[in-house]
Image (cartoon, rainbow, N blue to C red):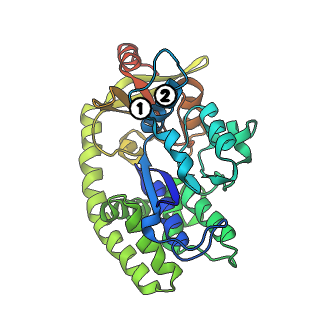
Amino acid sequence: MKQVLVIYHREDNDGACSAGIISAFLTRHKVAGLPTLNPSEIEFYGVSYVDLNKDWDEFLATKIKDNPPVKKPKITKWDKYQLIFMVDISFNKIEAMNYMYNHFGDRFIWCDHHAPIIEASKENPVGNSLGIRRTDQSALLNTWDWMVKASGLQHIEPSPYLKKLSDYDSWAFTKMPEYEKEEDQEKLFAFNTGVTRNSNLSPKWFALWVGYWLDDCERSHFNIADDADKLGTLVYNLDKERTSRAIAAHGDTNWSVYVPDFCRRACAIITTERINSRNFACFRGTDVVNGIVFKVDAASDTVTMSLYNVNDDDVFHCGEFLKAYYNGGGHPGAAGCTLTREQFTKLFLKRTI
């Protein structure tokens, strides 16, 4: 029987690695009253924000007496687990997060690093949830710190490679002296790319990798990281050249990000590619200060919108903007949200978000 459910952000290393860290600890140590588990007793549920929104809407449908659901919603099946972890992700709606805390209590552990939802939680019941929620490091290090503490262990330092993944995903690298040079930032991005490629964002891959570190098998842990670094350097440079060229040639610079009494000029592109802020580097030093990426999901009939700052020193907070206007969230330099087709069409006609 499954004892633990790990709900994790399936779209990047931070979420998948956070899930892997949980598994690595649970299969080696007693955590929060649970005995040491077998891997088969841990269930991973990888989700996007769109997935969680659908789960919540399905759950709410059970409350409508005249419209009973055809199938039992996922959320109602979570009662069977001893512990439920939610890492690097949250429901967009605070009432859904409050439900998780009110219903599951200390069986619910939430580790996150996204400022908008963390700030909202401080004035809501879910802010009392177990877990660590800090914005100065990524979810994987918050998860690491909580698992060490909950295991009753002396402090165990995460490996330097885990710290690198955190530096990347939390945008801490923009404030750290070791990444002052552009070439060092590029190496960090390349390493993250290599880990994504080699892991295929599988929590089980990360559990094995983290497990080597916990078992004091440093050489095995380092070898896996070195392999990712080599592949990442090759793949990242090729991807960056290709996608940056496409944005420079076909990006629409007639878009704007509207803030009260001011419009920030932006470049928008519709794609299925993995894009990050670096792909908009061709606009640095120009009046184009934001990058907008739209990805259409035909299966859910929605559009994912990502917003990036072109310049690392920009004080504009992408996450707070999308939280305020589109129920999204994220970091100062990179954030995302989900749009309906109707919303997307209206934005496309105005070319303003």
Residue 77 image offset from top left, x and y in percent: 49, 44
Q: Is residue 56 left or right of residue 34?
A: left
User: What residue is disc 1 on?
Assistant: 305
Query: Which element carries disc 2, helix, strand or loop?
Result: helix
Residue 181 can be seen in this image:
no
Q: Is residue 301 left or right of residue 325?
A: left
Residue at 52% x, 46% y is 78
Q: Taking 142 as reference, is 317 above or below it?
A: above
Q: Taking 268 as reference, is 66 above or below it?
A: above
Residue at 47% x, 72% y is 38
Q: Is residue 49 left or right of residue 139?
A: left
Q: Taking 172 as reference, is 288 above or below it?
A: above
User: What residue is disc 2 on?
Assistant: 57
Residue type, mark 1 in image: Met
Residue at 41% x, 59% y is 189
Residue type, mark 2 in image: Asp
- Foreground mark, 2 or 1, reads 2
Residue 348 image offset from top left, x and y in percent: 36, 18
Residue at 57% x, 53% y is 84
318 or 62: which is nearer to us? 62
